[in-house]
Image (cartoon, grey):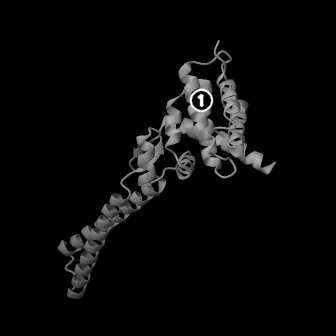
């Protein structure tokens, strides 16, 4: 019978300590595995040959990740191991290999807020853990509403000034000039607001939010980040 992944990894580490892993790499792997086993219910009868290969593939790269130096990436790699051990989730390993520390930090931010960083957002979108959302960002929405309100008020002022010139109240010459000046200024304000809206939308035409899969990944990462944080304070 094939053995659980955690045992496979333990044997792999033990048999390759002198040839493949340094002392610090061995410590990293043992720390990752111990952390994941606390939170993961691993099937006792495990493990297909593919699962064994993926576990060993994980170990080769995860051995470089020290939780003290890079807690964000450590949490990501532990999430990948949990996927292999518990759910046969091999896709996650390929995703984590593409992430750096800033990517993981952005994913954590995206649990509560949108981001408008094109480089990170587009990368996470291509990995299937983020998506584009138009006007979902709170700041973008507020800015859009402000532009809309300003435009409406300016338009009302402009129309009102023109109506006052056309009615039979017969404004004096000075009043007529003042109304014309007001109409011209209103027009300039309206044009300015219009171009501001265009410029803002060119800079930030959309924001990025997590997909359902991305949120699941982020929640799992957060659990391991909390574990690392608690361990560092003890």
Residue bearing mark 1: 55
Q: Residue furthest bottom?
A: 174
Q: Is residue 168 visible?
A: no
Residue 210 percent coordinates (x, y): 49, 42
Q: Is residue 180 left or right of residue 208?
A: left
In this view, the residue in front, 84 or 127, is: 84
Q: Residue furthest right?
A: 234
Q: Is residue 140 left or right of residue 193?
A: right
**In the depicted structure, whether residue 106 falls above or below residue 93:** below
Q: Is residue 230 left or right of residue 137?
A: right
Residue 88 percent coordinates (x, y): 56, 24
Q: Is residue 11 visible?
A: yes
Question: Residue 65 appears in which quarter of the rendering?
Answer: top right
Q: Identify the image quadrant of the N terminus.
A: top right
Question: Residue 222 appears in which quarter of the rendering?
Answer: top right
The residue depicted at 56 percent of the width and 23 percent of the height is 51
Dot 1: element: helix
Numbered marks: total? 1
The residue depicted at 69 percent of the width and 27 percent of the height is 11
**In the depicted structure, whether residue 172 falls above or below residue 140:** below
Residue 215 percent coordinates (x, y): 54, 38
**In the depicted structure, whether residue 197 falls above or below residue 45:** below
The residue depicted at 53 percent of the width and 49 percent of the height is 100
The residue depicted at 47 percent of the width and 38 percent of the height is 211
Q: Residues within 10 Å of mark 1 (few under 14, many from 20)?
A: many
Q: Residue furthest front?
A: 19
Residue 180 percent coordinates (x, y): 22, 79
In this view, the residue in front, 171 or 65, is: 65
């Amino acid at each position: 019978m094939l053995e659980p992944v955690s045992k496979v990894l333990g044997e792999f580490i033990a048999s390759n300590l002198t040839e493949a892993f340094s002392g610090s790499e061995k410590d990293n792997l043992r720390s990752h595995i111990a952390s994941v086993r606390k939170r993961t219910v691993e099937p006792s009868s495990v493990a297909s040959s593919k699962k064994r290969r993926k576990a060993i593939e994980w170990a080769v790269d995860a051995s470089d990740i020290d939780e003290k130096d890079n807690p964000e990436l450590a949490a990501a790699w532990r999430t990948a191991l949990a996927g292999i051990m518990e759910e046969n989730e091999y896709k996650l390993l390929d995703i984590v290999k593409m992430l750096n520390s800033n990517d993981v930090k952005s994913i954590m931010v995206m649990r509560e807020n949108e981001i408008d960083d094109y480089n990170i957002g587009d990368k996470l979108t291509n990995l299937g853990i983020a998506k584009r959302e138009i006007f979902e960002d709170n700041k973008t929405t507020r800015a859009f509403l402000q532009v809309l309100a300003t435009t409406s008020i300016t338009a009302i002022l402009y129309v009102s000034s023109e109506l006052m010139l056309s009615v039979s109240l017969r404004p004096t010459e000075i009043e007529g000039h003042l109304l014309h000046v007001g109409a011209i200024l209103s027009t300039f304000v309206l044009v300015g607001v219009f171009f501001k809206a265009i410029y803002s939308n060119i800079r930030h035409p959309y924001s990025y939010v997590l997909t359902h899969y991305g949120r699941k990944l982020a929640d799992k990462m957060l659990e391991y980040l909390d574990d690392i944080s608690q361990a560092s304070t003890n």
